[in-house]
Image (tube, rainbow, N blue to C red):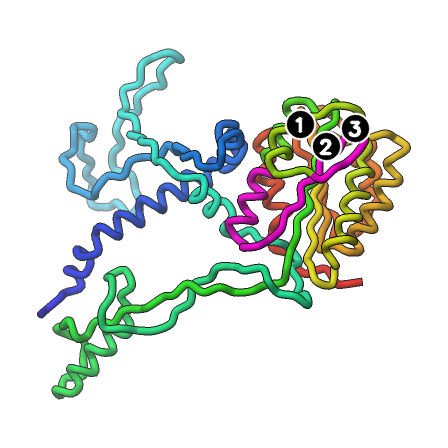
Amino acid sequence: MSVSQHDWSLHRKGQVDQERHKEKIREAVKKNLGEIVSEESIILSDGKKTVRIPIRSLEEYRFRFDPGRQTHAGQGNGKSKVGDVVAQEPKQGKGKKGDAGKDPGYDYYEAEISIEELAQLIFEDLSLPNLEEKRQQEMQTDAVRFTDVRKKGPMPNLDKKRTILENIKRNAAKGEPRFKDIKTEDLRFKVWEPTIRYQSNAVVLAMMDVSGSMGEFEKYIARSFYFWMVRFLRTKYNNVQIVFISHHTEAREVTEEEFFHKGESGGTQVSSAYELALKIIQERYNPQDWNIYPFHFSDGDNLPWDNDRCVQLVQRLMAQCNIFGYGEIREGHYRSPSTLMSAYSKINDKKFIAVTISDKKDVYPALRKFFAQRDPVPSR
């Protein structure tokens, strides 16, 4: 059997087109991540929703007759140089606002993508920061490992280098050590197997202000962040534990369902959430065995006399945790930081990471800031 390089390309044409399609989807997603991540219909869904993303249609390459746009030809006088303009088509003037356009538009279609597929695209370069080795290693992460080379397999797994070497070896045995006349016996395919890698345990403490000062916008933003955070953790890691804490003047541990759907009211005392987080860590998550990640979202409207207490508790948490993330939601760019954020500005520790969100599009940058790869913070 003789298979040319051109024949290989034709054989894999379906897969090549599929890869181009996937790449277009990836580009469309990445260009619109700010809007997609904060899309209300996604956040309020049950997590099984599919998302529609507009993508410019793909056209096959082909020769096309000039439809008549080029009406003149230009010719030099024999003295022209490369780059000289010998003729130009007259430019049309710009129409007034409201005039109908004459140029053809671009064809777009909507590609459907599931929440899980979208999550993989969003989180592909994110991870739990400063993950350290602990005494116990139970948290699983999925990985793919190259294990073998076989003579049969799917064409997408074709190992071109080994195939070429096998062809040259076979021809060399006949006295012609060169690449030619590929046969089925020359083909070699890579074999990949999923593997499970164990990492140190990790727990994330999700704390959210549900007091009366948190309006619809503030609560929506906080839940949007935690919606994607939970999916990030469950997409990238197996067995990572998540503790949900809601607070107003008092804090309590709640279920995931209550955390995302139950509303509260009343005043705000942020220190109550931190005190409960420290208690939970002491009772269930020994820092010698666990990587600990507390995150807190609030509008910052805290009791003034409680701010200093919050700073002290944050410092206690940072002594036991990998990082501490605080997100303050202040609708509109005109609003100044709260007294709580002002108090936190005095904290000089690389483990403390703060973000301010004033628009729905800020949710995705906040995710990237909290979960970006960074150099480990030295232990105290």
Asked whether residue 182 appears in the rendered view, the answer is no
Q: On the image, which quarter does residue 261 sit in? A: top right
Give how far apart the Cα atoms at labels 1 and 3 are: 12 Å
In front of the other: label 2 or label 1? 2
Q: Say which element carries label 2.
A: strand
Q: Are marks 2 and 1 in contact (CB under 8 Å)?
A: yes
Query: Is there CB contact under 8 Å for labels 2 and 3?
Result: no
Distance from the alpha carbon under mark 2 to that under mark 1: 9 Å
Outermost residue to the right: 305
Disc assigned to residue 348: none
Q: Is residue 116 left or right of residue 16?
A: right
Question: In front: mark 2 or mark 3?
Answer: 2
- Inspect the image, locate mark 2, and give the three-letter code of the amino acid beneath it: Asp
Residue 209 numbered mark, or none = 2
Q: Secondary structure at mark 3?
A: loop
User: Disc 3 marks which residue?
Assistant: 301
Is 180 included in the stretch rendered in magenta?
no
Labels 1 and 3: the sequence-earlier one: 1
Q: If the image is split into quadrants, where does the C terminus sit? A: bottom right
Residue 20 seen by the camera: yes
Left or right position of 76 against 327? left
Q: Is residue 171 left or right of residue 231?
A: left
Provide residue 361's location: percent of width, then percent of height. Answer: 57, 32
Label 1, residues with CA under 10 Å away: few <14, some 14-19, many ≥20 = many
Say whether residue 230 is left or right of residue 246: left
Numbered tag placed on residue 218 in the rendering: 1
First in residue order: circle 2 vs circle 3: 2
